[in-house]
Image (cartoon, grey):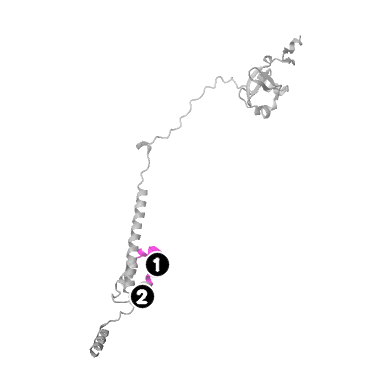
Amino acid sequence: MGLGLAAFLFAAGCSRSPAPPSPEFEQASRRWTALYAQKLDDAYLDPSIGEIEAQLQRVPADSVDSLASQSLLQRIQEGRTRMQASQEDQRRAVASASALPTMDPSSTDLPRQAEPVAAEPVDAGPADAGVIAGPQTGTPASELVAGFEGCFTRGTAVTVEGRGMRDTWQLSDRASCQLGYPSHRDSVLLVEDGRVLALLPKSAVRTVRRYEDGGTVPVDDGGR
């Protein structure tokens, strides 16, 4: 009994209690927290980070803060490595963009853009040739309504062989129109599909009388 008690007391006397909290860790942890709150991940590259690491390395191995100090020290080192790699990637990207060659068509296979060439002057003919005034073949029928000073009026629809009924237009009898469009005085404008199909002499248009049995007789014959 006495020997057992003595052995227990001896063992108890040999056990060591852990060292108290480390002031170095407390100060380093506080500085790191403030720095990271201010700069976030940029804190890993801040010049003052070296002092914080030195304080963490001075924490005694038997301190209750030893494991925490080693964990924070590892976190700082890994974060610095990651941020340095990110900076290097950015530097390479900028250098690559700055080194892009300019594209010179004279030194590549790229086709050169065609340079404008002055058009050859068109022979307009004699100076006194003039331009025929008024609607011509292809003129839109809408221009007959709103254009040409209102000098063209709708005429009687005619039957064109092989084409059926077609609208006609002719020059107004007004003196100003007769003087303004003399080439259209004796013409009939035949309209098809919304455009002037042809200009026909009035003498080419025959007026006939159609009977119920389908027969036709020219009006000039007086129906005989």
Task: Residue 148: give x, y in percent of width and height.
Answer: 67, 27
Going by the picture, which residue comes out furthest to the top?
Answer: 224
Q: Which amino acid does label 2 sit on?
A: Glu
- Badge 1 crowding class, 10 Å Cα cut-off, few under 14, some 14 to 19, many 20 or more, is some
Residue at coordinates 36% horizontally, 64% vertically from top-left? 44
Per the image, label 2 sits on a secondary structure element best described as helix
Q: Label 1: which residue?
A: 36
Q: What residue type is labelled 1?
A: Tyr
Above/below status of 9 relative to 56: below
Task: Residue 181: give x, y in percent of width and height.
Answer: 67, 22
Per the image, label 1 sits on a secondary structure element best described as helix
Q: Give the range drawn in magenta.
A: 30-48
- Badge 2 crowding class, 10 Å Cα cut-off, few under 14, some 14 to 19, many 20 or more, is some
Q: In this view, does 8 lie to the left or right of 178?
A: left
Whichever of callouts 1 and 2 sits on the residue coming sooner in the sequence is: 2
Task: Residue 179: give x, y in percent of width and height.
Answer: 69, 21
Task: Residue 120: give x, y in percent of width and height.
Answer: 48, 25
| Quadrant in which residue 128 is drawn | top right
Going by the picture, which residue comes out furthest to the front?
Answer: 1
Q: Main secondary structure of the magenta part?
A: helix
Q: Label 2: which residue?
A: 26
Residue at coordinates 40% horizontally, 64% vertically from top-left? 40
In the image, residue 215 lies in the stretch drawn in magenta: no
Label 1–label 2 contact, CB within 8 A? no
Please tell me which residue lies in front, 161 or 175.
161
Image label count? 2
Please tell me which residue lies in front, 173 or 166.
166
Identify the image quadrant of the C terminus: top right
In the image, residue 45 lies in the stretch drawn in magenta: yes
| Quadrant in which residue 3 is drawn | bottom left
Residue at coordinates 35% horizontally, 49% vertically from top-left? 96
